[in-house]
Image: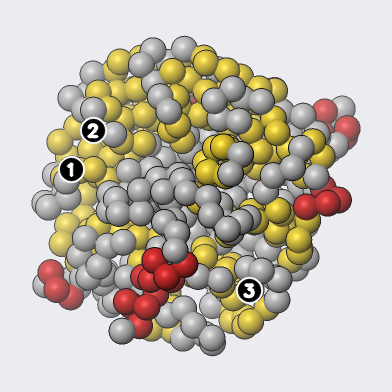
Amino acid sequence: MLRAALRRILFGRSAGWRLGGGIFLGGLIGLVGSAEASDWWQFRGARQDGIGTETGMPIAWSESGNEIRWRTPIVGLGWSTPAIRDGLAWVTTADRETGSLRLIAIELEAGEIVRDVEVFRKESLGPIHQKNSHASPSPIVTASEVFVHFGAHGTACVELDGTIRWSRVEDYGHHHGPGGSPVLFEGTLILTCDGNREQFVEALDIRTGKSVWRTKREHFLPSRTDGTDMPAIGFSTPLIVSTEAGPQLIAVAADHVSGFDPRTGRELWWSTYEGYSNVPMPVVWRDQVFVATGYTAPQLHAIRIGGSGDVTDTHRVWTLERGAPANPTPTLVGDDLYVLNDSGVLMCLSAETGERRWQERIGGNFSASPLLVDGLLYLQDENGRTTIVRPGPSYDEVAVNELDGRTLATPVPVEGGLLIRTDKELLRIDGASER
């Protein structure tokens, strides 16, 4: 009963609208994507919201337990999450010793590697932040191809048989390494490129890789460009939403968030703040977007979507001034916003007002974003521990499970199981119905 009720809340059946269908009714803004699609074909799932429709998730597991169906070693390091389609999990990885940037397909039933494609090879991959990898952006898989983005190392379209259809390199200086994942929209692949050399948003033709439009970022503090402060770097994945005025691309950057027309790249509105090295994705609830400001003094802003030009003073709804995340993306459950910060504090906030309903210190360090699936929140820290929490009016811990290895990539659901990526391997953990 609880899970059925949660599903009605999550997918908007009782509200008379279809989440992810691009429908705008009564002041609600919909995510672009299919609410029925079970394949996790892009970062944070079909609707970019971190919510899975899969069932039969595992509750308890251990490093040596029979819950682990398979574990497949992966050469190199990558914090990209798997993209799932037609029985395959696609991941990227980077081998620093050889400079090889690769795309790998792993069969879901037995964990066998069926594709291993070198997409780029560099003489040197360069420096990297200790929490990053040279293969952190997640791939996108469609019925006929996979799109991969390695930041300033390059972007490519790879056919399902491993043939590279096109590739291109734009060295905008990704500073701490690549971060933001690409998104698809009407025949284009959209990238946010916020480096220490250039900052821009660009749409590429998915057939050729040629630029359709490119818009330079603006609205930075002067100290970002004169060398007196950290550069205007960012690592956030953009979000496509459908509004009454048409589709919008919401893209977070250092010192501001903007809404763009995804067909032309024209900037429609922006709201400023002070922050840089932004990682969390924007999250949408009704007509508001929740935006994390990044490092130094992280805050979380609720901003009303829309308007024209600078909407900083007119569209700010509320601000979480303490406890905001620098890395994990918040997750919505109905009208509640679950915010997990990097130091392991989980908060349940009112999405409408920002009021703190409850707060619990889980402990540990977190980079992966919460996953909501089968009526439960899966919270994975950086050292192999996953805390499972039941959403509700108070903190309700269901289980705590541990694996060996570093775990900075967000877990991905498959029907009857969960994929977890460590620094050494990809594991499939089965639910109780599968054992």
For the residue pair 167 and 204, the one nearer the viewer reads as: 204
Return the disc, 1 or 3, that comes first in the chain's sequence.
1
Crowd band around label 3 with a 10 angstrom C-alpha radius: few (<14), some (14–19), many (20+): many
Q: Which residue is mark 2?
A: 143
Residue 40, image x, y percentages? 32, 49
Residue 332, image x, y percentages? 52, 65
Q: Which residue is mark 3?
A: 349
User: Residue type at mark 2?
Assistant: Ala
- Any mark on residue 86, and which? 1
The answer to whether marks 1 and 3 mark residues whose Cβ atoms lie closer than 8 Å is no
- SS state under label 2: loop
Q: Is residue 35 left or right of residue 368?
A: left
Q: Could you tell me if residue 34 is visible in this image?
A: yes
Crowd band around label 1 with a 10 angstrom C-alpha radius: few (<14), some (14–19), many (20+): few
Question: What's the distance in space between the residues labelled 2 and 1, CA to CA?
Answer: 8 Å
Q: Quadrant of the C terminus?
A: bottom left
Residue 161, image x, y percentages? 18, 25
**Is 181 located above or below residue 419 in the figure?**
above
**Is 184 located above or below residue 323 in the figure?**
above
Return the disc, 2 or 1, that comes first in the chain's sequence.
1
**Residue 250, located in which quarter of the rendered image?**
top right
